Amino acid sequence: MKLILLAWVIVVLLSPPPVAGAEQQSHDEQREEPRRAMPRPPQSPLRFTQARGNERQSLEVTYVDPKTIEFRLMKSGRCSRHEQGRARITSNWWLGRETDENEAGEAIAVQEYTFSKNSKCTISFRIDEGDWTQATLREADECSSNCHLSIESMHLRKQ
Protein backbone atom coordinates (compact mmCIF):
# COMPACT_ATOMS: atom_id res chain seq x y z
CA MET A 1 0.00 0.00 0.00
CA LYS A 2 2.83 2.39 0.84
CA LEU A 3 4.46 1.57 -2.48
CA ILE A 4 1.32 2.54 -4.44
CA LEU A 5 1.01 5.81 -2.51
CA LEU A 6 4.69 6.60 -3.16
CA ALA A 7 4.30 5.83 -6.89
CA TRP A 8 1.24 8.12 -7.09
CA VAL A 9 3.10 11.02 -5.40
CA ILE A 10 6.03 10.60 -7.81
CA VAL A 11 3.72 10.61 -10.86
CA VAL A 12 1.95 13.74 -9.63
CA LEU A 13 5.20 15.56 -8.94
CA LEU A 14 6.77 14.64 -12.29
CA SER A 15 3.74 15.46 -14.46
CA PRO A 16 3.73 18.87 -16.21
CA PRO A 17 1.61 21.59 -14.61
CA PRO A 18 -1.75 22.30 -16.25
CA VAL A 19 -1.73 25.20 -18.70
CA ALA A 20 -4.62 27.33 -17.47
CA GLY A 21 -3.31 30.80 -18.36
CA ALA A 22 -2.62 30.08 -22.03
CA GLU A 23 -6.27 29.78 -22.99
CA GLN A 24 -7.64 32.67 -20.94
CA GLN A 25 -7.42 36.30 -21.97
CA SER A 26 -5.39 38.60 -19.80
CA HIS A 27 -7.25 40.91 -17.42
CA ASP A 28 -6.48 43.94 -19.62
CA GLU A 29 -7.88 42.24 -22.74
CA GLN A 30 -11.10 41.43 -20.92
CA ARG A 31 -11.63 45.08 -19.86
CA GLU A 32 -10.70 46.62 -23.19
CA GLU A 33 -13.55 48.19 -25.15
CA PRO A 34 -14.04 47.24 -28.77
CA ARG A 35 -11.67 49.24 -30.93
CA ARG A 36 -13.21 52.25 -32.61
CA ALA A 37 -12.19 53.21 -36.13
CA MET A 38 -10.86 56.69 -36.76
CA PRO A 39 -13.75 58.96 -37.84
CA ARG A 40 -13.49 60.16 -41.43
CA PRO A 41 -15.05 63.63 -41.67
CA PRO A 42 -15.58 65.09 -45.15
CA GLN A 43 -13.15 67.91 -44.34
CA SER A 44 -10.73 68.76 -41.59
CA PRO A 45 -11.19 70.68 -39.42
CA LEU A 46 -14.97 70.62 -39.17
CA ARG A 47 -16.52 74.05 -38.56
CA PHE A 48 -20.00 74.23 -37.06
CA THR A 49 -21.77 77.59 -36.72
CA GLN A 50 -24.95 79.09 -35.33
CA ALA A 51 -26.31 82.61 -35.64
CA ARG A 52 -29.34 83.95 -33.75
CA GLY A 53 -29.74 87.68 -34.25
CA ASN A 54 -26.45 89.29 -33.20
CA GLU A 55 -25.39 86.16 -31.21
CA ARG A 56 -22.83 83.99 -32.98
CA GLN A 57 -21.38 80.68 -31.83
CA SER A 58 -18.85 78.52 -33.67
CA LEU A 59 -17.13 75.22 -32.99
CA GLU A 60 -14.05 74.00 -34.82
CA VAL A 61 -13.25 70.27 -34.41
CA THR A 62 -10.14 68.34 -35.44
CA TYR A 63 -9.90 64.57 -34.82
CA VAL A 64 -6.73 63.53 -32.99
CA ASP A 65 -7.41 59.80 -32.64
CA PRO A 66 -10.51 57.56 -32.56
CA LYS A 67 -11.48 58.78 -29.07
CA THR A 68 -10.11 62.35 -28.92
CA ILE A 69 -10.91 65.67 -30.57
CA GLU A 70 -9.26 69.07 -30.38
CA PHE A 71 -11.76 71.90 -30.32
CA ARG A 72 -11.96 75.67 -30.50
CA LEU A 73 -15.22 77.20 -29.32
CA MET A 74 -16.11 80.87 -29.73
CA LYS A 75 -19.17 82.89 -28.81
CA SER A 76 -19.78 86.55 -29.56
CA GLY A 77 -22.65 89.00 -29.41
CA ARG A 78 -24.26 89.94 -26.08
CA CYS A 79 -21.24 88.32 -24.37
CA SER A 80 -17.89 87.00 -25.50
CA ARG A 81 -16.31 83.66 -24.73
CA HIS A 82 -13.46 81.50 -26.03
CA GLU A 83 -12.65 77.91 -25.02
CA GLN A 84 -10.20 75.44 -26.49
CA GLY A 85 -8.71 72.10 -25.56
CA ARG A 86 -9.04 68.35 -26.02
CA ALA A 87 -12.17 66.33 -25.37
CA ARG A 88 -12.50 62.55 -25.10
CA ILE A 89 -15.34 60.12 -25.63
CA THR A 90 -17.47 59.98 -22.53
CA SER A 91 -16.55 56.83 -20.63
CA ASN A 92 -19.82 56.41 -18.75
CA TRP A 93 -21.83 56.11 -21.97
CA TRP A 94 -21.78 52.90 -23.99
CA LEU A 95 -18.97 54.01 -26.28
CA GLY A 96 -20.36 57.52 -25.98
CA ARG A 97 -23.37 56.73 -28.23
CA GLU A 98 -26.62 58.59 -27.87
CA THR A 99 -29.11 60.23 -30.20
CA ASP A 100 -30.14 63.81 -30.87
CA GLU A 101 -32.93 65.26 -32.96
CA ASN A 102 -32.38 67.11 -36.20
CA GLU A 103 -34.55 70.02 -37.42
CA ALA A 104 -36.97 67.60 -39.10
CA GLY A 105 -37.54 65.87 -35.74
CA GLU A 106 -35.71 62.69 -36.76
CA ALA A 107 -33.40 60.90 -34.33
CA ILE A 108 -29.76 60.93 -35.42
CA ALA A 109 -26.87 59.05 -33.86
CA VAL A 110 -24.22 61.27 -32.29
CA GLN A 111 -20.89 60.71 -30.60
CA GLU A 112 -20.38 62.51 -27.30
CA TYR A 113 -17.02 63.95 -26.25
CA THR A 114 -16.39 65.60 -22.87
CA PHE A 115 -13.96 68.35 -21.88
CA SER A 116 -13.32 68.93 -18.17
CA LYS A 117 -12.07 72.44 -17.57
CA ASN A 118 -11.98 71.85 -13.81
CA SER A 119 -13.80 69.68 -11.27
CA LYS A 120 -17.02 71.70 -11.60
CA CYS A 121 -16.96 72.69 -15.28
CA THR A 122 -17.53 70.13 -18.02
CA ILE A 123 -18.54 70.78 -21.60
CA SER A 124 -20.03 67.99 -23.74
CA PHE A 125 -19.80 68.03 -27.53
CA ARG A 126 -22.31 65.86 -29.39
CA ILE A 127 -21.32 65.44 -33.04
CA ASP A 128 -23.31 63.75 -35.80
CA GLU A 129 -20.63 61.45 -37.21
CA GLY A 130 -22.96 59.88 -39.79
CA ASP A 131 -23.74 62.85 -42.02
CA TRP A 132 -21.44 65.35 -40.27
CA THR A 133 -24.14 68.02 -40.44
CA GLN A 134 -24.72 69.11 -36.85
CA ALA A 135 -23.19 69.45 -33.40
CA THR A 136 -24.73 70.38 -30.06
CA LEU A 137 -23.13 71.54 -26.83
CA ARG A 138 -24.06 71.09 -23.19
CA GLU A 139 -22.20 72.64 -20.28
CA ALA A 140 -22.39 72.56 -16.51
CA ASP A 141 -23.95 75.66 -14.93
CA GLU A 142 -20.69 76.36 -13.08
CA CYS A 143 -18.73 76.89 -16.32
CA SER A 144 -19.77 80.48 -16.89
CA SER A 145 -22.26 82.46 -14.89
CA ASN A 146 -22.50 85.36 -17.34
CA CYS A 147 -21.96 83.85 -20.82
CA HIS A 148 -23.68 80.49 -21.30
CA LEU A 149 -23.31 78.53 -24.52
CA SER A 150 -26.35 77.92 -26.69
CA ILE A 151 -27.63 74.33 -26.55
CA GLU A 152 -29.35 74.61 -29.94
CA SER A 153 -27.90 72.68 -32.87
CA MET A 154 -25.00 74.18 -34.78
CA HIS A 155 -24.68 73.26 -38.44
CA LEU A 156 -21.69 72.42 -40.59
CA ARG A 157 -20.39 75.47 -42.43
CA LYS A 158 -19.81 74.73 -46.11
CA GLN A 159 -16.37 75.65 -47.35
Image (tube, rainbow, N blue to C red):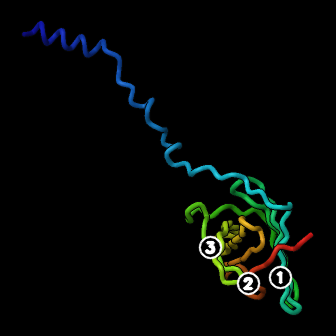
> Mark 1 — residue?
50
Q: Residues within 10 Å of mark 2 (few under 14, many from 20)?
A: few
Counting residues from the start of the chain, the first of labels 3 and 2 encountered is 3
Q: Amino acid at mark 3?
A: Thr
Numbered disc 2: secondary structure: loop
Is there any visible trace of residue 80 in the rendered image?
no
Q: Please determine whether, in this image, residue 22 is positioned above or below residue 17.
A: below
The extreme top residue here reads: 3
Q: Residues within 10 Å of mark 1 (few under 14, many from 20)?
A: some
Position of residue 125 measured from the top left corner of the image (x, y, whole percent): 71, 71
Q: Nearer the viewer, mark 3 or mark 1?
A: 3
Asked if disc 2 and disc 1 are in contact, CB closer than 8 Å, the reply is yes
Numbered disc 1: secondary structure: strand
**Where is residue 19, by image quadrant?**
top left
Q: Amino acid at mark 1?
A: Gln
Numbered disc 3: secondary structure: strand
| Residue sitting nearer the eye, 55 or 106 | 106
**Residue at (65, 62) in percent of width and height:** 89
Please indicate whether residue 70 sits to the left or right of residue 115 in the image. Answer: right
> Mark 2 — residue?
152
Total number of numbered discs in the rendering: 3
Counting residues from the start of the chain, the first of labels 2 and 1 encountered is 1
Q: Nearer the viewer, mark 3 or mark 2?
A: 3
Task: Tell me the quarter of the image containing the N terminus.
Answer: top left
**Residue at (84, 78) in percent of width and height:** 49
Q: Please determine whether, in this image, residue 1 is positioned above or below residue 80.
A: above
Alpha carbon separation for disc pair 2 and 1: 8 Å
Position of residue 150 measured from the top left corner of the image (x, y, whole percent): 75, 84
| Residue sitting nearer the eye, 99 or 140 | 99
- Which label sits on residue 99? 3
